[in-house]
Image (spheres, grey):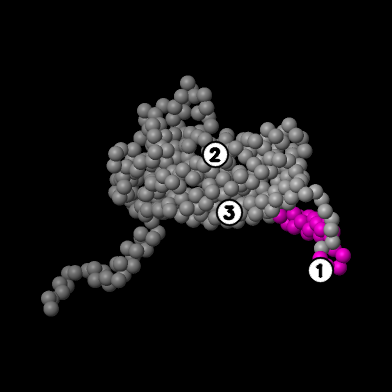
Amino acid sequence: MPVISPTTPINTFVDRDTITNSTNATVADALQVVCAWPVSGQYGAGSRVLYYILVAVCVFARKAEWLRSAGLAAALLVPAVAALHAIVLAAVHVDGAVDMDVYGAFQLCSIGILAAPVTVRLSQTYFNDPGRNMIFLWTGLVLAGLLSLTVEFYRIETFACSMDDFGQPMSSDPSQFNYMNAGCGLALPCNTGPAGPFSPLRRGATNEIFVIPAPDRLTFNAATLVAAACCVPAILSLIYTWIKILEVNWKNSYGHHDEPISGTNGATIGKMKGVNAVIRTFLSTVEVPLFGGAVIVILVFGELNFFSRQVNFQTEPMTSIGRELNRNDANKKPLSTWVKTA
């Protein structure tokens, strides 16, 4: 056995397991980042606010026919387009990168699927209208979009970032992230070059991709659970609406019959429907606050997430409408500082 030099510091003899555990702890505590395309303009703040107003008009002004018709058409169209976009995003998934438009599609689809079917079920103004068949198909489309978003959120992978491009240690605090100067040593270079990620949905001016910290206001895991949870009321709404459509079609074909039900003590179909109406009224007193609260929670947390620094990074600000963006200094300035008077 070799002789240990008396000049060797005692703190150099560290147990191997201690070093391994320390390394694992450092990796676990490192800031999690993703290679992401920014949220596109179609899910900007102006578009979202307009959609919220349309939903509010459909709920609170449903007695005004001229407002109801215009508001309902637009309020159903926006999440339908978002659902189609979600399906395409899941179909063209890119490993190692994420299109942040998943958050925009999620915001519109989740609020729409919670607000529209409940309004239709509880409102005779909507349900007695032939448009209920269209809402049935719309619910199926948005349900497909939510299922696609659930899959896409689940497939998103984050990476640990321990130092920036200058070799400086990276803080685990997302607010301290060194944007534009932290490649984080990703296996797939996060750039617009041929070696970087490619998505057929991101071409031309929309192909800019950046390394950003993983969102912490509405995380990918939380969005996965919420998107999956929103599928449950959508499925129940489809079942309920389908039964009601069959019932209405039966009445239109064979008329109304209030015959006694065999095996009962004089109960008729009309009396049982009256009992069902009372039960439905009682359940609606619970359903409206429940779904209304869910919509408000998703709206608040979703907007907090959109305005967080991670998700808002390099998105087009509302102040850029009608103005010219100067991208000559793109590597030094965030997009919010690019705006100048045209």
Q: Nearer the viewer, residue 42 or 199?
A: 199
Residue 231 has which mark? 3
| Residue 211 visible in rendering | yes
How far, Cα to Cα, is label 2 from label 3?
Answer: 17 Å
How many marks can you see? 3
- The local secondary structure at tag 3 comes to helix
- The local secondary structure at tag 2 comes to helix
Question: Residue, x 30% and y 38% (percent of image)?
Answer: 193
Residue behind mark 1: 263
Amino acid on which disc 2 is placed? Val
Q: Quadrant of the N terminus?
A: bottom left
In the picture as drawn, the residue positioned furthest to the left comes out as: 2
How far, Cα to Cα, is label 1 from label 3?
Answer: 38 Å
Residues rendered magenta in the picture: 262-288
Question: Residue, x 65% and y 54% (percent of image)?
Answer: 239
Residue 308 has which mark? none
Look at the numbered discs 1 and 2 and tell me whether their residues touch, using CB distance below 8 Å.
no
Amino acid on which disc 1 is placed? Gly
